Amino acid sequence: MTALIEAHDIHLAFGETPALRGAALAADAGEAVAVMGPSGSGKSTLLHCLAGILRPDAGEVHFDGRRIDTLGEGARSALRRDRFGFVFQFGQLVPELTAEENVALPLLLGGTRRAAALAEARPWFARLGLDGLEGRRSGELSGGQAQRVALARGLVTRPRVLFADEPTGALDSLTGEQVMDLMTAAAREEGTTIILVTHEARVAAYADREVVVRDGRSTSLSGDRIAS
Ligand code: ADP
């Protein structure tokens, strides 16, 4: 099977700092891949290249049979909006908006009318254990609740790929487990691919497979190692 999303031989430097020096990663449809490695090894940079946020200096990124790293900013931005979902370490909800407006935001940005966008957003509250919190603003939510709202926002467009960068990094371990359980269950039901950046082995254990990044280079580990 051809991978849904794939990066080959990615090189990227920030000025004099080489962040990626030949990194690679491939994920099939519906697969969850954890990107592991020490802080500063290039994990987030690799995620940003895969998601079309950064353009690598060299190497190729393909999504759904199409090369995407050579697309212009407008096309990559449309791809991010329509095909990809994102969850970051700190939920980054818009504080002026209610929880349900935050969840509906990617749909609103994509041109869906407000009533229709809110109607799409609502079922995610029951699904992620957030019933009754629709009208709250981010300041009135716990860290775990806010991150579940961010997860709903990441999934509301039914993306092909969900990019999660240290999604449990700001949560205590129990709340982090809840978020990972919900994320992996929802992605499995929707057939969404997950690219999960984490430095924690117990978070990576939710994925089907691991890719380890060290000094900007990656090594793919088989699922057997995770299972053992
Ligand atoms: P990780 O996610 O594994 O912690 P990063 O991908 O964030 O690693 O960073 C890889 C390297 O690139 C580090 O040396 C980091 O300091 C550097 N780096 C990352 N982002 C930037 C940036 N925007 N400007 C300059 N250097 C950066």
Image (cartoon, grey):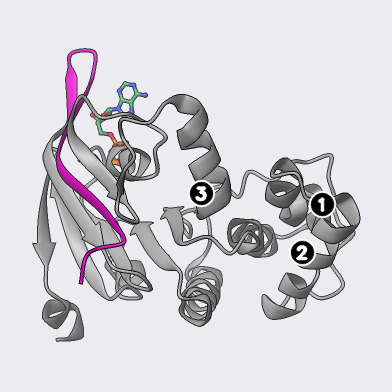
Picture coordinates of residue 13 (x, y %)?
Answer: 21, 22
Identity of the residue drawn at 77% across and 64% down: 121
**Residue type pointed to by label 1:** Glu
Task: Using a 10 Å C-alpha cutoff, classify the residue at mark 2 as few (fewer than 14 neighbours), some (14 to 19) or many (20 or more).
Answer: many
| Element assignment for label 3 | loop
Q: Which corner quadrant of the figure contains ligand 1?
A: top left
| For residue 213, above or below residue 131 | above
* Mark 2 and mark 1 residues within 8 Å of each other at the beta carbon: yes
Magenta span: predominant SS is strand
| For residue 173, above or below residue 48 | below
Does mark 1 have its CB less than 8 Å from ligand 1? no
Find disc 3 in the rendering and name its residue: 88
Find disc 1 in the rendering and name its residue: 101
Picture coordinates of residue 43 (x, y %)?
Answer: 27, 45
**Residue type pointed to by label 2:** Ala
Picture coordinates of residue 223 (x, y %)?
Answer: 17, 78
Part of the protein shown in magenta: 1-19
Q: Residue 121's mark?
A: 2
**Residue type pointed to by label 3:** Phe
Which is closer to the viewer, label 1 or label 3?
A: 1
Q: Is residue 55 visible?
A: yes
Identity of the residue drawn at 30% across and 37% down: 45
Task: Using a 10 Å C-alpha cutoff, classify the residue at mark 1 as few (fewer than 14 neighbours), some (14 to 19) or many (20 or more).
Answer: many
Q: Residue furthest top?
A: 15
Q: Is residue 85 visible?
A: no
